[in-house]
Image (spheres, rainbow, N blue to C red):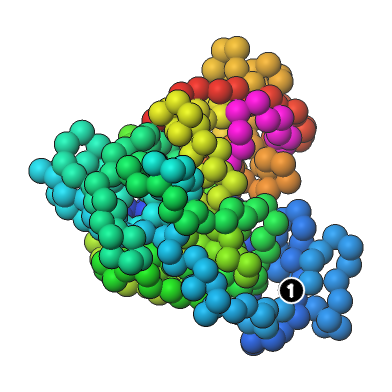
Amino acid sequence: MKSSIAKLGVGFLLGATVVGGVATAATSEPLGTKACVDKRTQVLYLSSNGTCPASRTLVTLGGSTIDVKSIAALVTPSVVSIKVTSINGSGTGSGSIYKSSSTTSYIITNSHVIENAATTGTILVELSNGDTFSATIVGRDSTYDIAVLKVDKGNLPIISIGDSSKISVGEAVVAIGSPLGLASTVTSGIVSALNRPVTAGSLGAESYVNAIQTDAAINPGNSGGALLDSSGRIIGVNSAIASLSSDGTAGNIGLGFSIPINEAKRVVDELIQTGKSTRPVLGIFFDTTYTGTGAKILRLSPGDGAENAGIPAGSVIRSIDGVKIADPVGAIVRIGSYAPGTTVTVVVDLPTGGQKSFKVLLGSAPSN
C-alpha cells in the first residue's frame, strides 16, 4: 500500500508500537469460563449457558488442554538462537528451522534481528544441542519484519507449520525462543486478540504487522522465535512486546505480538525462491491531517486497484473484509495481511454522503 503516514507511538520492544483499535482483545474472565468468539470479527462474548450460535465458536478461557511438556520436547530442537555481531552493533534473537535438505537448512527470523549484519558482520546460529554454525542472509523484508537465514548444515529438524487463520481468541499457545540469550526458553499462555495493528522500526522504514496478541511471556531476545498452537505447530513469529518504559527495555507485561504464520509463510517462500518479496497494493495515499475515525483517502494512485474499483478521493475507509478500520495504520496492516492479487471488500463513507462497498483487486509491488 502506498502511504504518506507518519509514525505513531513509542515504548515497544525494538521500536514496536501498537496503534488503533482494530483488534478486539479478550475480556478478563476466570479460568474455565465458557465464551463465544465471533467467527467474522473475533470479538469475544461471555456464554451464559455454555453454548454458542452458529456464527460464533465456543472456547474455554484457561481451560484448553495443552501438553506444554510434550510440545517443548517436540519443538525445541527446531528453534534456534541467533547472535549478530557487526560494526553497527550486536544482539541476540531467535529463529525456527523452516526447511532442510541433505546439505542446507533455512531459518525464519525477524528482519530487525539481523538488520545490523545486513551489509557487514557475522551471524551465528546455535542449535538446541549447542552446535553453532555461521549463517548467511537469503533475503529479508523489513515491511513485514521477516528474514530468512541459510546454514550449510542439512537434515535438521524442521518446525511443523500451522494455520493462523484458524486460531481463536482464548486458545492456548506456547512460545519458544531465547529471551535475554537464554536458549530454549518455553512459556505458555493464550491468544489474547487477533488482527492487532502493530508497527515497528524508525520513521520511513516501518514494519506493519497484523499481529496475534498473546499473554505468553515474551522478552527481548524472543524476537524471531515460534508461537505454537496446542499441537506444536507454528502459528506465529514472535516479533514485539509492549513495555511500560519509554525506551522499551522493560520485560514482559503480558502483551506480546506475533506475525501470523500464514502472512509470514508467503514472504518466506518468496525470499527462498528469489531473494526478494512482494507486497499487496491498494493504491491510495492517506490524508494524515484527518483526525476522525477511519482512514481518509487523500488521493489515488493512477491505474491501481482503488481507482479501478471506482473509490473516489476524499472517501473514508470504514472496514476491509468486515474488519473495522480505526485509522490509516489499521488499513495498512489489514491490506498487508493479504497476498497480491487478492480481491477485498472495502466499505467507505463517500465524500458526497452515504456509504458504499467496493470490490478491489490488490496489485503487487516489490517490498522493502
* 63, above or below 350, in the image: below
- Residue 301: image location, x then y, percent: 54, 17
At horizontal 29% and vertical 39% (from top left) the residue drawn is 136
Residue 214 can be seen, yes or no: no
* 219, above or below 149, in the image: below
- Residue 211: image location, x then y, percent: 53, 54
Decide whether residue 343 is among the magenta residues: yes
Total labels drawn: 1
Residue found at the very far right of the displayed protein: 54
Q: What element carries label 1?
A: strand
Given the image, on which type of amino acid does mark 1 rest?
A: Val
At horizontal 29% and vertical 53% (from top left) the residue drawn is 125
Decide whether residue 245 is among the magenta residues: no
Query: Which residue is nearer to you in this view: 229 or 61?
Result: 229
Query: Which residue is nearer to you in this view: 138 or 154?
Result: 154
Which quadrant does the C terminus fall into? Answer: top left
Q: Name the residue under label 1.
A: 59
At horizontal 49% and vertical 73% (from top left) the residue drawn is 73
Q: Magenta part of the protein: which range?
A: 337-347
* 283, above or below 243, in the image: above
Quarter of the figure with residue 169? bottom right
* 266, above or below 259, in the image: above
Quarter of the figure with residue 238? bottom left
Left or right: 230 in relation to 127:
right
- Residue 44: image location, x then y, percent: 70, 68
Residue 43 can be seen, yes or no: yes
Neighbor class of circle 1 (other Cα within 10 Å; few <14, some 14-19, many 20+) is many
Left or right: 57 in relation to 136:
right
